[in-house]
Image (cartoon, rainbow, N blue to C red):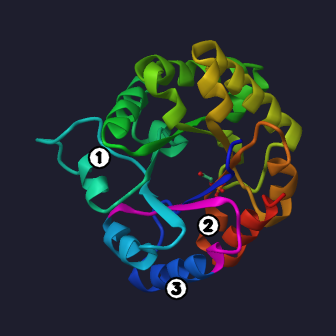
Amino acid sequence: MRRTLIAGNWKMNGDLVTNAALLQAVRAGAQAHSAELVVCVPAPYLAQTQAALESSSVAWGAQDMSAHEAGAYTGEVAGRMLKDFACRYVILGHSERRSMHGESSADVAKKTKQALAHGLTPIVCVGETLAEREAGSTSHVVQEQLQPVLSEVLDQLKHIVIAYEPVWAIGTGKTATPEMAQEVHALIRQQLAAADSAAANVVRILYGGSMKPDNAVDLLAMPDIDGGLIGGAALKAADFLAIAQASQP
Ligand code: PGA
């Protein structure tokens, strides 16, 4: 069975003092949950996060990485650097990176391959904008975003995580209904199955977009929603842990 994964995306938030309290509280509360917990923190805080979470049940990761191995890529962070800080996960293709940093699905596919080459588990994000949903093109958009990744790492699909994050639900307080989300998650699983049927059963598909303690139970009860990618609510330990609690059978 697929173990529930609750991943926090801190985005560009935090400082040494607030992080210390948040990491300590997440660590202290984590044992009580059967879900796997991960925090994806800004790169400068990876060393702090590693020190705070080492030998705990909480994993950590980054929010992006380079598609390249090393070299003249000013400002970029390489996969092997993330491994130096014992990252297990890396978020790739978040809609904020696609829209503000011009990342294409082909770029995301290359980063996914590079992450896997370094033993990192990529959390590959896909999702439609409001205009795309209203135009009835949600499934087309999501499938087009995912396909380059599936082709690039076809032989390693079982090692990836996918996050469906409708752009209109991110940071807006608007959540997809559990049924709306389930419909897209089922489509994604079908697309996976067409590429590799064994992988389709094990790949976890997370929902993201204003997931909070009060809507998490219904979302996580859906058959193809295997966890959450949590933005705003991951900055409060109590909310993050309450979402993990919501996933308990
Ligand atoms: P949100 O962000 O939970 O604040 O909507 C989710 C995300 O962007 O990953």
- Give the residues drawn in magenta, as a range: 29-43
Q: Which residue is mark 1?
A: 79
Residue 97 seen in this snapshot: yes
**Which numbered disc flags the more N-terminal residue, 3 or 2?**
3
CA separation, marks 3 and 1? 27 Å
Decide: few, some or many residues near mark 3? Use Cα within 10 Å; few <14, some 14-19, many ≥20: some
Q: Which residue is mark 3?
A: 21
Name the residue type under label 3.
Ala
Task: Farthest residue to the left: give it.
Answer: 72
Quarter-wise, where is residue 138 in the image? Answer: top right
**What label sits on residue 119 in the rendered view?**
none
Q: Nearer the viewer, residue 210 or 224?
A: 224
Name the residue type under label 2.
Ala
Instruction: Determine whether 197 is above or below 53 in the image.
Output: above
Observer-side mark, 1 or 2, equals: 1
Q: Nearer the viewer, residue 124 or 221?
A: 221
Which residue is drawn at the image coordinates 31% and 54% (left, top)? 82
Q: Nearer the viewer, residue 243 or 209?
A: 243
